[in-house]
Image (cartoon, rainbow, N blue to C red):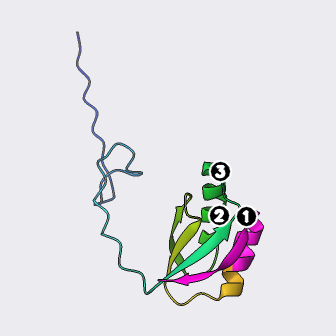
Amino acid sequence: MSETTVTVESSSTEGSCCGSCGTSAAKAPATAAAERAVFQVKGMTCGHCVSSVTAELKKVTGVTEVAVDLATGRVTVDSAAPLADTDVATAIDEAGYDLIGRLGA
């Protein structure tokens, strides 16, 4: 029986090409957001609602993270700079829900 040796060379020094096998370099920890705001949203009832609101808010320029508490209707938004309530209201409206107002941090 003959033996074949395969050598794979990588031009990247950061691990595998996509990281799906778990061999990529560790990601740097996320930096703290410059701003955090909490909003009350009406009408969310399920996981799809959470996904829709999250997706629309992440489209807003500067948004770095979104966390939705379905039980309370509170949506926490981290951003690089302060967000205009009108931008948040537009995103939540696009998702199909109603912004009640800003609650604070």
How far is the residue under mark 2 from the one under mark 1? 5 Å
Residue highlighted by disc 2: 53
Q: Toward the viewer: 7 or 54? A: 54
Residue 63 in the image: state x and y as whole percent.
55, 77
Residue 26 in the image: state x and y as whole percent.
28, 60
How far is the residue under mark 3 from the one under mark 1? 10 Å
Q: Helix or strand or loop: what does disc 2 sit on? A: helix
Q: Mark number for residue 85?
A: none
Does the residue at mark 2 contact the one at mark 1 (Cβ under 8 Å)?
Answer: yes
Q: Label 3: how many residues lie within 10 Å, few (<14), some (14-19) or many (20+)? A: few
Q: Label 2: how many residues lie within 10 Å, few (<14), some (14-19) or many (20+)? A: many
Whichever of labels 2 and 1 marks the residue nearer the N terminus, that label is: 2
Residue at left offset 27%, top offset 38%: 7
Label 3 sits on what residue type?
His
Residue 67 in the image: state x and y as whole percent.
50, 66
Q: Toward the viewer: 98 or 65? A: 98
Label 2 sits on what residue type?
Val
Q: Helix or strand or loop: what does disc 3 sit on? A: helix
Residue at left offset 61%, top offset 57%: 50
Whichever of labels 3 and 2 marks the residue nearer the N terminus, that label is: 3
Q: Label 1: how many residues lie within 10 Å, few (<14), some (14-19) or many (20+)? A: some
Residue highlighted by disc 1: 95
Give the quarter of the image for residue 57.
bottom right
Residue highlighted by disc 3: 48
Label 1 sits on what residue type?
Ala
Give the quarter of the image for residue 25.
bottom left
* Magenta-highlighted residues: 89-105
Q: Toward the viewer: 100 or 17? A: 100
Verify whether residue 52 appears in magenta: no
